[in-house]
Amino acid sequence: MIEPSVPLVGHHVNWRQRVIRSLIYGRDVDRDAKARARVGLAMLAFAAVYGVIAFKLTFIAVVGDSHGTRRTASQDAIATARPDMVDRNGTILATDVKSPSLFGEPRRIIDQDEAVELLTATLPDLETQEVRDRLASKKGFVWLKREITPRQQADIKKLGVPGIGFLRENKRVYPTGTEVSHLIGLVNIDNQGIAGIEKWLDNNGLADLHRAGFASDRLQRPVELAVDIRVQHALRDELLKAKDKYKAKAASGLVSNVNTGEIVAMVSLPDFDPNNPREANDPDRINRLTTGVYEMGSTFKTLTLAMALDSGKATLNTMYDARGPLRYGKFAIHDTHPLGRAISLSEVFTFSSNVGAARIALAQGVEAHKAFLKKVGQLDRLRTELPESASPIVPKRWGELNTITISFGHGVAVAPLQAVMGINAMVNGGYLIPPTFLKRSEEDALKMAKRVVKKETSDKIRYLMRLNAEIGTARTADQIAKGYYIGGKTGTSEKVINGRYAKKQVLNSFTAVLPADNPQFQVLVMLDEPKPLPETHGFITSGWNAVPTGGKVIERIAPLLGIEPRFDLPPPDRLILASSKTAQAESR
């Protein structure tokens, strides 16, 4: 009888199992020890996985967001670093500080109603519906409030609301407040420049650096401005006093280095605090020195006389008929203080004769007059670092009547800074230098300077300005700022109201150079619609308000600018004209 085959099958199975075990475990191995090692390895693996999870949960609980969220938020908010701004002596005018901002992650909010209630109770200025809408969105990240205080941050942390976190951003602060607001400008909530030098920075590469990720906190050099905060403060203080005293609608002024074009101080009142951006939206707080254009009045006579002297067709002693009004068609040009006789070119300046200035311009001709004003930068838009600028208002058809009125500052409206640039060229030896709000050396200024009048012409203009401070309309300023040997020219221009000139609404200006024998700086003071006072005897012309204001400004800033007072100096014909003739003779 044949035996069943089951044992053979079992034997075959046992053989196959032995082969597999041999391949897996090898031979002569303690399988119990191997099993214990495998269990230990598995325990370590589980411990590592749970450790990573625990660390991640702890990180989220403490920091309040994930790395991905932080990266997304930092890309979403462009409140990146900006370089410091400093004045010419290194005083900080604008800098960045770190400020916390509040955000939410709607997908992680457990109880939306509770989160809204707690947040609005802690931050009462939050709009309840706006917060609710944002937390109800399907976004991974939403801003709830930018730039909160450290105390508010601490209070919100105590709430322990999941899905609510903080991101530290750069916040722009201005330590000097309103002092240099129109010059520096301001930034928006994302630290992007929207006005002034702040906007210029973004337009000149800073925004590109931000987008490329290279504008880090510590790798940016400070921006050195030409402004001197000490001079700026003194100018602003005196303008505030004058605006209040004469009940003026506005007041403005600047101090310019005539040899470099640097703007050492610039004030336009009313101004604003860049730390409170809402103030900047007030349309009355514009920068009147760059964005406003005005008929500059008799200060333009400086350019008219310089044109005649430089052409060689006139001298300081050339006579002009000022016996009565100058009639042109139905128009008649009058002098404020008519002399009733022929007057010299020098007297045209010191007595501020409109009739004399008109006759001087007519003698040069319409085309020559127009060409000269264009050469000295009065007919084209002035471009500086400040984005805020305006084009001059120039007659479309320029005829003789236009030349007559423009000769004494009516009929062409320019930005005051533009007029200052032209006057600088008349007193600095004849060089037209573009204004700048950044530090600039005399060497760099000369490289971009353009000669527009001869040095002899510049000497004669300086003589006329000094003479005007001694016996003309600028006497009051010279008496206040004794010893600084200033030269000056006044301007009173009637404002155009409803298409007509209003005699009681004027824009007054006073332009001064110091010292007149070797000018270093020009000072411009402007008062918009000053009112008559008992001490001004009811007059509102610039000699009664802008001139004394300019004198007080010079008295305060001259020592700051390194100008020492000098007394018992000879008259201008000897100190300026005689020295000029001597220099010319020696050069020959």
Image (cartoon, rainbow, N blue to C red):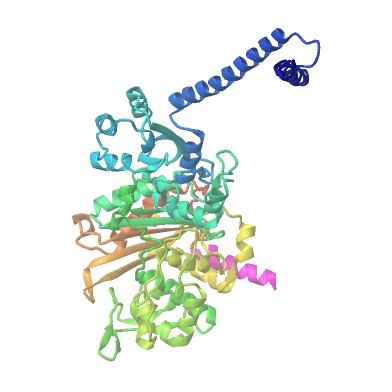
Range covered by the magenta-colored residues = 572-588
* Residue located farthest toward the bottom when viewing the structure as drawn: 329
Q: Which residue is at the front of the view, 43 or 461?
A: 43
Is residue 20 shown left or right of residue 528?
right
- Residue 549 occupies which quadrant of the picture? bottom left
Tell me the quadrant of the picture where the N terminus can be found: top right
Is residue 34 shown left or right of residue 185?
right
Query: Height in image: 468 above or below 55?
Result: below
Query: Height in image: 311 above or below 282?
Result: below
Query: Height in image: 429 above or below 254?
Result: below
Q: Residue at x 64, y 58 (%)?
A: 443
Magenta span main SS: helix
Residue 258 among those drawn in magenta: no
Q: Residue at x 42, y 64 (%)?
A: 389
Instruction: Tell me if residue 481 can be seen.
Output: no
* Residue located farthest toward the right when viewing the structure as drawn: 27
Residue 575 among those drawn in magenta: yes
- Residue 44 occupies which quadrant of the picture? top right
Instruction: Tell me if residue 558 can be seen.
Output: yes
Q: Position of residue 532 (x, y in %)?
A: 20, 59
